[in-house]
Amino acid sequence: MDLFALPPLAHLLDLATRALLALTALLDPLAGPAAAALAVVVVTLMVRLALIPVGVSQARAEQSRARLAPRLRALRERWGHSPERLQRETMHLYRDEGASPLAGCAPVLAQAPVVGLLYAVFLHPTVDGHTNELLAHELFGVPLGRSLAGALSTGTMDAATLAVIGTLVAVIAFAAEMTRRVLRPPVDPAAPTWTAGLVGVLQFTTAAVAAFVPVAAGLYLAVTTVWTVAQRRLLRRRYPLPS
């Protein structure tokens, strides 16, 4: 079932498509055939600018978790035999310190609707009964609505498609590696050793996703991932982790 066939979501899809087409027309004198791709980049930057306060909150939360790590370890040592009491004491500690264990998830959750909407815009050949003109736009000769999975299944895979999608995936993977090496999140000494490895794997999930979504959505993910690395590096200087 296509959720965007439901009237409220169909209307939202139509508005998003019209807005992107208007922005594409505005950027056409500057970018020409790549105007729609540039429109996606502009939308990405606008979203990231709007989420700067959320990024600041995330940096503060990361600093708070690192600062509270010894006390959290002490709580686990004391109440590890009683999960309910441990959870209660942990939440009391976060509340008393004005911190939240979920604050770091906010940027991802805030962007999810935007990525989903971009995915839908470049997935539907028709919107509100009209041909989706955005699908005619390209990035270096590759339609913005093409995906790696789609190209393989329809036999439209070519060197340009492989190069564009491969570059987007490589950029995201590089940003994930930079995050893993330079911006390694604080590790709770009391946590199981396998959790650190799991976190490292999850950081590359976005790169895997970019290989299967339309090029436009992959472009959004690449730009937002690079932005995230740069922003976190700046905020790490403003809110350094305790030694």
Image (cartoon, rainbow, N blue to C red):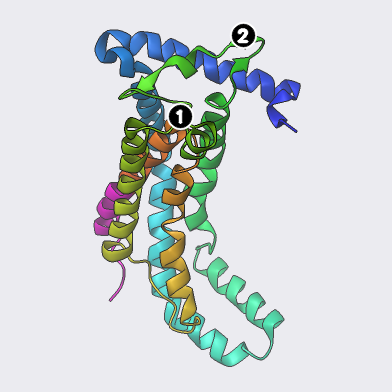
> Mark 1 highlights which residue?
156
Quarter of the image for residue 39 reads top left
Report the residue at 68% width, 27% height from top.
4
Residue 139 in the magenta stretch? The answer is no
Identity, as a three-letter code, of the amino acid under mark 2: His
- Quarter of the picture holding the N terminus: top right
Residue 97 position (above or below residue 89): above
What residue do we see at 50% from left, 63% from top?
A: 99
Q: Which residues are magenta?
A: 229-243
Secondary element type, mark 2: strand
Counting other residues with Cα less than 10 Å from the Cα at mark 1, is it few (<14), some (14-19), or many (20 or more)?
few
- Element type where label 1 sits in the image: loop
29 sits to left or right of 103:
left
Give whichever of 31, 90 is nearer the camera: 31
In the displayed structure, 81 sits above or below 146; it is: below
Residue 22 x/y as whole percent: 44, 10
